Image (cartoon, rainbow, N blue to C red):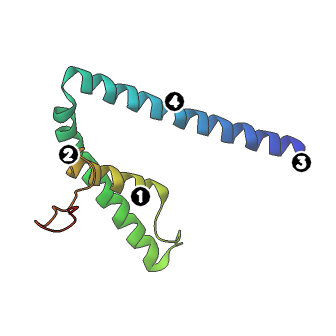
Amino acid sequence: MERVLNLLLIRFGLIVGGLVVLALLVFAVALVLKRRGRLDAARRYAAPAAHAASRYLDDRSAARGRGGVSRGGGSVAGAVVRAAARHLDDGGRGPRRREREPGRGEAR
């Protein structure tokens, strides 16, 4: 039993380590693209792929909800891809802020 638990722990560590390396690699590529001024071009190319992946994961989770096993509102991967697609739609500017109405919120 101890051997099985050790193997599961090693497997978990390798998966998490791989994900961390992948995240660092994506961050480094984005940083290099930003410094060279090519981030907007990369964003234009990545947006359709992110939207397609988001639609695919939405369709998959909808099909799973009709008769398959539900994961309580979708998978983590679907949430990450949808957040990336929203970020790409915003153009990397972050959440949109509402404009203040004149005369409101000003100190007098």
Residue sitting nearer the eye, 107 or 84: 107
Q: Position of residue 82 (x, y in %)?
A: 34, 56
Q: Sequence-wise, which precedes: disc 3 or disc 2? A: 3
Amino acid type assigned to the residue bearing label 1 in the image? Ala
Amino acid type assigned to the residue bearing label 3 in the image? Met
Label 2: state its secondary structure. loop
Q: Residue at x 74, y 41 (%)?
A: 9
Label 4: state its secondary structure. helix
Alpha carbon separation for disc pair 4 and 1: 20 Å
**Alpha-carbon neighbours of circle 1 within 10 Å: few (<14), some, or many (≥20)?**
some
Q: Sequence-wise, which precedes: disc 4 or disc 1? A: 4
Q: Position of residue 51 (x, y in %)?
A: 25, 53
**Residue 77 placement, left or right of 19:** left
Q: Which residue is mark 3?
A: 1
Q: Sequence-wise, which precedes: disc 1 or disc 2? A: 1
- Choose top left, top right, bottom left or bottom right for residue 83: bottom left
Alpha carbon separation for disc pair 3 and 1: 35 Å
Q: Which mark is residue 79?
A: 1
Q: Sequence-wise, which precedes: disc 3 or disc 1? A: 3
Q: Which mark is residue 21?
A: 4
Q: Position of residue 30 (x, y in %)?
A: 32, 30
Q: Sequence-wise, which precedes: disc 3 or disc 4? A: 3
**Residue 42 placement, left or right of 102:** right
Alpha carbon separation for disc pair 3 and 4: 30 Å
State if disc 1 and disc 3 touch (CB < 8 Å): no
Amino acid type assigned to the residue bearing label 4 in the image? Val
**Of marks 3 and 4, the one in the foreground:** 4
Label 3: state its secondary structure. loop
